[in-house]
Amino acid sequence: MNLNRDVWVYDDVVGTVITEDNKSDFISEIQFMYDVLNLVINGDHIEYNRLFTDDYRRRSGDKIRDRFTMQQLFEIEMEYLGTGEMGSVPFTDIKLSYKIRNNNGTFRNDLAANEEGRLPVVYTIVYTGGELKIAELLTYAQYMSGLY
């Protein structure tokens, strides 16, 4: 692919490319999301689906993809949005934005099949059972509305 596949991490206005070599320089939630991106790129739907909390799986049903193919992600950006608490469980919100070249809809059927589609999503990450898990996944528009 002749496309920019770097993963940029933004904190306010500062952007840095994250790689396997420097990912330990970032907070654990950013490292986790970098690994999530690699699962998506490699089409590893089994490991990807294991990253969601049991509660999210119960509530979401069809949002979890049983199978998806390798995804040609490019123009990838991650942004740390902040932290909070769900009840007594601390969470971190990370916004993820990318395009998918030749999108076949197996992972994201809400993005255009051409190379112009971009619809940012927000992953809410919690530390539970000794590991990081995805507790919520929303489009950025849903997240900003606060109506979820």
Image (tube, rainbow, N blue to C red):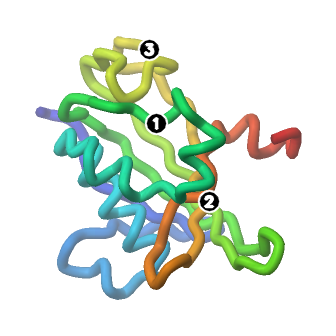
* Mark 2 or 3, closer to the camera: 2
Q: Amino acid at mark 1?
A: Ile
Residue 10 lies, with reference to residue 39, above or below; the image says below
Q: Compare marks 1 and 3 and give the one earlier in the sequence.
A: 1
Residue at mark 3: 112
Residue 34 point in image, percent of width and height: 34, 63
Q: Amino acid at mark 2?
A: Thr
How far is mark 1 from mark 2, CA to CA? 15 Å
Residue closest to the eye, 70 or 115: 70
* Mark 1 or 2, closer to the camera: 1
Q: Left or right? Give the position of 140 relative to 125.
A: right
Residue at mark 1: 64
Q: Compare marks 2 and 3 and give the one earlier in the sequence.
A: 3
Residue at mark 2: 124
Q: Amino acid at mark 3?
A: Ala
Tell me which residue sits at (21%, 36%) in the image.
Answer: 3
